[in-house]
Image (cartoon, coloured by chain):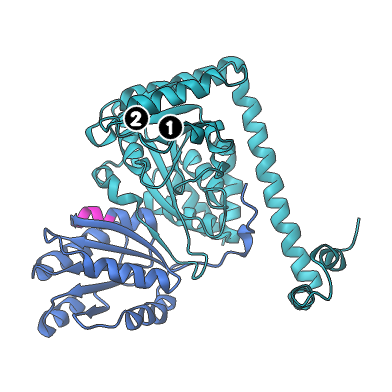
Chain colours: A blue, B cyan
Amino acid sequence: MPDTDAAAVAEKIRVLVAKPGLDGHDRGAKIVARALRDAGMEVIYTGIRQTPDMIAEAALQEDVHVIALSVLSGAHLELFPRIVDACRERGITPQNTLFLGGGIIPPDDAAMLQGVGFSAVFGPGAHTGDIAAYVREHVPALDRS
Amino acid sequence: MSGRLDELQARLLDGDRRALSRVLSWVENGDARGREMLRRLYPRSGRARIIGLTGSPGAGKSTVTNEFAKVCRARGLSVGIVAVDPSSPYTQGAILGDRVRMAELHADRGVFIRSLASRGALGGLSAATQDVVHVLDAYGKDVVLIETVGAGQDEVEIASTAQTTVLVNTPNMGDDVQTLKAGIMEIADVLAVNKADLPGVDRMVSALKALLSLAPDRDWQPPITPLVATKSEGVEQLVDACEAHHAHLVETGRLADAESARARQQIVALARGRVLANLLNEIGEERLSQLSTAVASRSTDPHSAAEAWVGGE
């Protein structure tokens, strides 16, 4: 048995990083995953070509605080709301989980995504440090009861 | 609080995946609610088949685990998967990537996958792994597969956690001296040789056979099962080999002995953690850092410092 004291382990921030849809450009998702790892978080990386159900199911099984999605194909308005719906069916809502979007997402689209429950959208040029800081700042406000 | 826990317990035992997921987090985090739920659920555990899969990074553990789960599902068994990946020794962050190879299991409600970070434990698992397995067992999973951190030569914790340990080898892992070494080669109940479509598989199999022929008389000879997990070849035989090992444990009465040994190890590990936490509370972090400074500057030695901290025998 490992002799780490389980009682002393504090709650870690757990983040699901996933790429829905068909584009295979996962460099950005991997960089964000790596940056959040280096910020001390536990990042569940699911890889490319994930369906909304796959993402929602992984979020459920992994009990994550954050769902971070990356799309570079322009299909974000199609995919992101469906993922929020698939999550809601499983009791995962913007009240208890932070939804973050990333990719080539115009400002008007970002505003629409915020309307369906996305807390923030990070586009090209976003600093990974800012993403980690955003997560750290907003996770404590989630209703995890 | 107890009303909320009653409700959660009822939901969990009714098969609610979200309730299970939340309880697993509490258990993993050493939350008091996790300990209470474990106390309630533990009597219901002890029915699942616990199978560990270990091997070096890149040997194909996740792919083999995925295929193993598919065969179990085809045989009508529900499956829990606990997949452990390493935490950073510097930032305590982690990338848990085992799900990438298990994507096809997502739609099957009979499979529940939980990724764990090792969180500083060194044996290839995390400190909470056993408790997570207990909860999945109590939840009603017929089979719990534990995939370890990519293991080198000495990460043998899995042998005392699983009932059957599968060591996933690949061809071309080095010369036959590697198979002679103590440690991980000794804990395998089943020797899988994955990527058996690569050259060198015959040499690997004969090196393993040679190793086994030299083994001290044991009443269980670990079977060697070549497989190509990416093509789903040889997986049925691997599952059969694990079944045969389990039957052997039951026949020889070893299963009950091993369960007591596992319990003993977990009690000792938990007690050790508590004693250490109490020591830190009572004697204090400040005293420990004074002593560390004294040892670093050579004004005392580590043994004397430990004695000064907790007292001699």
Q: Are marks 2 and 1 in contact (CB under 8 Å)?
A: yes
Q: Image quarter for residue A64?
A: bottom left
Q: Residue at x 40, y 68 (%)?
A: A37
Whether residue B219 is visible to the viewer of this picture, yes or no, is: yes
Of residues A5 and A120, the one drawn nearer to the viewer in this rendering: A5
Secondary structure, mark 1, is: loop
Q: Residue furthest right?
A: B313
To the question of a shared chain for discs 2 and 1, the answer is yes
Position in image of residue B88 (x %, y %) = 48, 64
Does the magenta-highlighted stretch encompass residue B77? Answer: no
Q: Residue at x 25, y 83 (%)?
A: A126
Of residues B92 and B194, the one drawn nearer to the viewer in this rendering: B194
Position in image of residue A4 (x %, y %) = 63, 57
Residue interval drawn in magenta: A52-56
In the rendered view, tell whether residue B151 sits above or below residue A127: above
Q: Image quarter for residue B289?
A: bottom right
Q: Residue at x 41, y 78 (%)?
A: A136
Amino acid at pointer 2: Cys
Which residue is disc 2 drawn over?
B72
Q: Residue at x 44, y 48 (%)?
A: B150
For this view, does B260 lie left or right of residue B251?
Answer: right
Res. B142 mark: 1
